[in-house]
């Protein structure tokens, strides 16, 4: 069953043939973060795929994962080319190293999940919040509801975690 919804005035759609993403976003719609765990090598993977990127096994089980981690990198957008985002600039797109499975299968690898920085209720973060986030900031997952069967995983500052004294940020103009 195709899922369609509206996010910031944009139509989002997952076609019924895209089984992995339909399952992923159904878990997100329940405000639960799940990833595929390979039934053969037992490693988690992201994004959802039809086969394990490490051992190529097509068999996997959806597994609950704690949505917490540390900002690995980010993009601060000041000129939104998507009209729906123009009123929300500047906004951040974060690449987050999940705490789960960090350093596997090699010491330099991690499960890295990209999403926007939002307030705890899933609304795109205001400029004062954007300025507080940099590489090393601790974040937790929240969800922005789109429609039945679809919510977007997003990141917000984890106020319960110890934060770096000064997270690394690109030089500001």
Image (cartoon, helix red, strand yellow):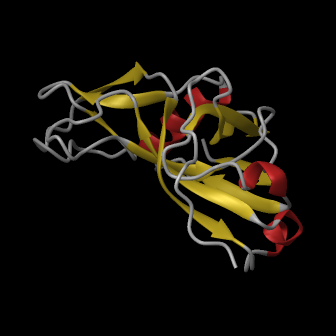
Q: Quadrant of the N terminus?
A: top right
**Quadrant in which residue 76 is drawn:** bottom right
Tally of numbered tags = 0
**Quadrant in which residue 65 is drawn:** top left
Q: Position of residue 146 (x, y in %)?
A: 76, 42
Is residue 71 found left or right of 58 in the rendered image?
right
Q: Quadrant of the C terminus?
A: bottom right
Relative height, residue 65 to residue 28 (above, below): above
Q: Position of residue 17 (x, y in %)?
A: 47, 50
**Quadrant in which residue 27 is drawn:** top right
Q: Position of residue 98 (x, y in %)?
A: 42, 35
Q: Position of residue 2 (x, y in %)?
A: 62, 47
Residue 61 visible, this angle: yes
**What residue is at 53 percent from the left and 40 percent from the top?**
22
Most foreground residue, 160 or 96: 160
Residue extending furthest right? 87
Is residue 7 found left or right of 156 in the rendered image?
right
Relative height, residue 165 to residue 85 (above, below): above
Residue 126 visible, this angle: no
**What residue is at 29 percent from the left and 29 percent from the top?**
101
Most foreground residue, 87 or 78: 78
Relative height, residue 38 to residue 52 (above, below): above
């Amino acid at each position: 069953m195709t899922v369609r919804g509206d996010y910031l005035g944009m139509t989002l759609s997952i076609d019924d043939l895209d089984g992995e993403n339909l399952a992923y976003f159904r878990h997100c719609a329940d405000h639960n973060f799940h990833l595929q765990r390979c039934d053969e090598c037992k490693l988690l993977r992201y994004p959802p795929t039809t086969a394990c990127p490490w051992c190529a096994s097509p068999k996997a089980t959806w597994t609950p994962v704690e949505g917490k981690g540390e900002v690995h990198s980010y993009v601060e957008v000041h000129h939104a080319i998507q009209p729906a985002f123009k009123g929300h600039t500047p906004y951040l797109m974060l690449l987050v190293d999940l705490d789960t499975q960090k350093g596997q299968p090699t010491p330099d690898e991690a499960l890295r999940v990209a999403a926007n920085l939002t307030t705890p209720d899933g609304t795109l973060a205001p400029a004062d919040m954007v300025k507080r986030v940099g590489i090393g900031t601790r974040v937790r997952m929240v969800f922005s509801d789109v429609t039945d069967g679809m919510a977007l995983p997003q990141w917000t500052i984890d106020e319960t975690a110890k934060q770096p004294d000064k997270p690394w940020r690109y030089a500001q103009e």
